């Protein structure tokens, strides 16, 4: 099935996001399809993480709408928000694992909080999730006892505990060496292709973007909106926008001379 034929799982319409009445990004219109690796790009301070916070329901839009599987966090009751959240998983830049809990205990946590499964079933599912991300054998270790890349994988395993259809990752490659970053990229691709998980990723790591992204949404700080959406290889090759050209080619935008 071609990407444009797959079911839309996230839809933003005339979306404006920010804090209070301060608009960071406005007039955003985009869709994310099931099984897609969708990357949010842009320069520092353009609002990538702000948009992500709105997509996962931590903040309500200033205007417009964003739907997750046809439902909106904005205006939803507490029960409705929990139902929407059950369909998504989130990892943060640091991994945000609980340092006093073992890797297995971290993954078990969501299952203990949000299901009525017996302990043996929770244990089995948690071990399976760790196996999916290549961390079998680390169950009894603390986060401080494993590498940074392994902590990122453990965070993904925890985010997958409730079998969400969509995973939101905030700077997953941050702080990783090139080899570990490439291994994480391959994990993301395998989960998307083999399990049909949809990924929405905030990153500025160009090597990863070209390796894993089906499409990117490019946000511009000055214009306060998205200035492109598409395959990163196509944008690098074809875009005539100076901001996009500079970003993908790692080139400084030359200022105009008054001479």
Image (cartoon, rainbow, N blue to C red):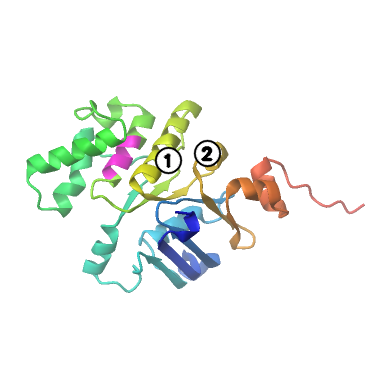
Distance of label 1 from label 2 (alpha carbons): 9 Å
Residue 160 numbered tag: none
Q: Is residue 101 visible from the viewing direction of this image?
A: no
Q: Which residue is mark 1?
A: 189
Q: In what quadrant of the picture does the N terminus appear?
A: bottom left
Total count of labels: 2
Among all residues in the image, which is located at the extreme front? 1
Q: Which residue is mark 2?
A: 211
Q: Position of residue 246 (x, y in %)?
A: 69, 46
Span shown in magenta? 153-158
Vertical relation: 220 (above or below) 133: below
Q: Is residue 6 visible from the viewing direction of this image?
A: yes
Q: Looking at this view, is 221 or 121 the one in front?
A: 121
Q: Looking at this view, is 52 or 165 the one in front?
A: 165
Q: Looking at this view, is 113 or 256 the one in front?
A: 113
Query: Residue at the spot x=9%, y=53% of the render?
Result: 116
* Disc 2, SS: helix
Q: Looking at this view, is 20 or 208 the one in front?
A: 208
Q: Is residue 10 left or right of residue 235?
A: left
| Label 2 CA crowd tier, 10 Å (few <14, some 14–19, many 20+) | some
């Amino acid at each position: 099935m071609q990407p444009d034929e797959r079911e839309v799982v996230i839809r933003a319409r005339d979306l404006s996001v920010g804090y209070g009445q301060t608009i960071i990004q406005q007039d955003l219109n985009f869709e994310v399809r099931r099984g897609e690796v969708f990357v949010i790009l842009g320069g520092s301070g353009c609002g990538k993480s702000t948009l992500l916070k709105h997509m996962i329901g931590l903040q309500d839009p200033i205007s417009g709408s964003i739907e997750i599987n046809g439902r909106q966090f904005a205006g939803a009751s507490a029960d409705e928000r929990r139902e929407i959240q059950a369909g998504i998983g989130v990892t943060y830049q640091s991994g945000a694992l609980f340092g006093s809990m073992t890797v297995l205990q971290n993954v078990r946590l969501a299952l203990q909080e949000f299901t009525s499964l017996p302990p043996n079933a929770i244990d089995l599912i948690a071990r399976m999730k760790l196996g999916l991300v290549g961390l079998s054998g680390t169950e009894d270790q603390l986060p401080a006892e494993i590498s940074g890349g392994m902590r990122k994988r453990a965070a993904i395993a925890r985010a997958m505990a409730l079998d969400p259809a969509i995973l939101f990752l905030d700077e997953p490659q941050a702080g990783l060496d090139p080899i570990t970053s490439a291994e994480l990229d391959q994990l993301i691709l395998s989960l998307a292709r083999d399990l049909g998980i949809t990924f929405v990723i905030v990153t500025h790591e160009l090597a990863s973007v070209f390796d894993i992204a089906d499409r990117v949404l490019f946000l511009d700080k000055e214009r306060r909106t998205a200035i492109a959406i598409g395959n990163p290889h196509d944008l690098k090759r074809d875009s005539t926008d100076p901001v996009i050209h500079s970003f993908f080619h790692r080139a400084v935008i030359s200022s105009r001379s008054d001479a």
